[in-house]
């Protein structure tokens, strides 16, 4: 009898061990199954978000404006920003903070710090903010290389569309080398087009590659609606990060971008039977162009009784057709070439004057 009881106990213990092992195997298999449900693409998505999310911030602004009764009332705005240095320099779009009286920055952990605008470049729609981290460790964006981008590569946008903070969307690079007109009226070239969803509030946030590196500054969307009602229609636009790398240090060091100046106030594209270029409308008195002898149009005032008539003489104005060996067909052609130079450098203008082409050396000065 005792032997039978002993055998029964051994059997029960053996079955219990089997049950525990079976349960452990089921648990392990179940856990493994849960992990394996994440696809490779999903792993990339989550890794990008974990890598870049903490370096993106939410920007809110208060700008004074007048109502219909000419009373000053606060107007609120919002956008996104990219933390680029650990000591508190943040990049955003100029149009996000333009005319703002107060700027606040909300970080990934919900903490809020006041910021001040330390540098702006309206021509490229960029602005730099500064916050005092006060013992706060800031995550910094990892910067990529926009010179190696290709159409079809996957990209991500992180920002605060319509105030929905820390939102990530994804898409592809739809085209590279686009051109847009900035708030300052300057044509920005080399712009990245993407179909990743971009809406109001995304401005100033990062465009990211699959490694979580910032390859562009989200700056605009294309919409047929007016700016107040604009929303994503499949075309988002970002300034290339290599352009940001060139401008950002100047906005910290000088609070603006010091560009070389040619001293020409205005030009107009012109095309004739034998020549194509830009007609010089006006030059800056005592500027580089005037010193080099570049001639603009002449405006003569003729008094006819009580009336003053303007007589515009463009016959003797210079037509610029080349700068060095680069053809010039628009004001942007001229400005884009000059921007690659430095103050003090000499360029050669090929101008059409008195029925023939002439080469005129010109020494660039320091702009603004």
Image (cartoon, grey):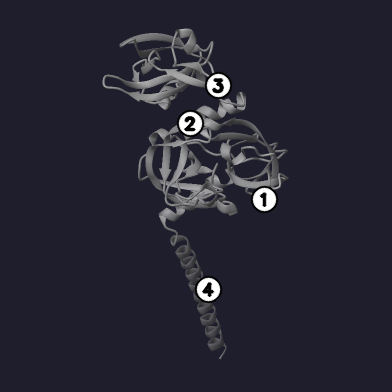
Label 4 close to label 2 by CB (< 8 Å): no
Query: What is the spatial separation of the Cα atoms under label 2 and label 3, in whole angstroms?
Result: 41 Å
Which class describes the residues within 10 Å of circle 3: few (<14), some (14-19), or many (20+)?
A: few
Of labels 4 and 1, earlier in sequence is 4
Pick the quarter of the image with the C terminus. top right
Which residue lies under the disc numbered 1? 110
Query: What is the spatial separation of the Cα atoms under label 4 and label 3, in whole angstroms?
Result: 109 Å
Which residue lies under the disc numbered 2? 186
Of labels 3 and 1, earlier in sequence is 1
Query: At which x and y percent is residue 316?
Result: 39, 13
In front: label 2 or label 3: 3
Which residue lies under the disc numbered 3? 306
In front: label 2 or label 1: 2
In front: label 4 or label 2: 2
In front: label 4 or label 1: 1
In front: label 3 or label 1: 3
Query: At which x and y percent is residue 241?
Result: 48, 35
Label 2 close to label 3 by CB (< 8 Å): no
Looking at the image, which residue sits at the far front? 305
Query: What is the spatial separation of the Cα atoms under label 4 and label 2, in whole angstroms?
Result: 72 Å
Q: Nearer the viewer, residue 237 or 292?
A: 292
Query: What is the spatial separation of the Cα atoms under label 3 and label 1, in whole angstroms?
Result: 69 Å
């Amino acid at each position: 009898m005792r032997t039978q009881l002993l055998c029964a106990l051994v059997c029960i213990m053996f079955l219990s061990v089997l049950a525990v092992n079976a349960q452990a195997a089921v648990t392990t298999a179940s856990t493994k199954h849960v992990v394996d449900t994440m696809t490779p693409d999903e792993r990339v998505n989550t890794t990008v978000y974990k890598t870049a999310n903490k370096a993106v911030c939410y920007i809110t602004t208060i700008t004074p404006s007048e109502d219909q009764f000419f009373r000053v009332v606060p107007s609120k705005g919002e956008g996104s920003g990219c933390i680029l240095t650990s000591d508190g320099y943040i990049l955003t779009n100029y149009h996000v903070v333009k005319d703002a009286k107060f700027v606040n920055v909300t970080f990934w952990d919900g903490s809020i710090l006041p910021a001040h605008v330390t540098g702006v470049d309206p021509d490229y729609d960029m602005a730099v903010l500064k916050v005092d981290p006060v013992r706060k460790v800031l995550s910094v964006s990892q910067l990529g290389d926009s010179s190696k981008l290709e159409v079809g590569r996957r990209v991500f946008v992180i920002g605060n569309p319509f105030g929905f903070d820390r939102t990530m969307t994804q898409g592809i690079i739809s085209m590279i080398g686009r051109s847009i007109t900035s708030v300052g009226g300057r044509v920005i070239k080399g712009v990245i087009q993407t179909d990743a969803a971009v809406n109001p509030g995304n401005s100033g946030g990062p465009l990211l590659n699959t490694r979580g590196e910032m390859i562009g500054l989200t700056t605009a969307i294309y919409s047929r609606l007016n700016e107040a009602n604009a929303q994503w229609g499949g075309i988002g636009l970002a300034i290339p990060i290599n352009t940001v790398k060139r401008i950002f240090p100047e906005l910290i060091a000088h609070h603006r971008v010091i560009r070389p100046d040619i001293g020409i106030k205005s030009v107009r594209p012109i095309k004739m039977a034998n020549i194509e270029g830009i007609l010089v409308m006006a030059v800056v008195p005592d500027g580089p162009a005037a010193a080099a002898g570049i001639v603009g149009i002449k405006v003569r005032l003729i008094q006819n009784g009580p009336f003053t008539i303007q007589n515009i003489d463009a016959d003797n104005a210079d037509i610029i057709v080349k700068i060095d060996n680069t053809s010039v067909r628009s004001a942007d052609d001229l400005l884009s070439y000059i921007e690659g130079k430095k103050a003090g450098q000499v360029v050669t203008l090929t101008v059409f004057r008195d029925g023939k082409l002439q080469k005129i050396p010109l020494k660039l000065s320091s702009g603004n």
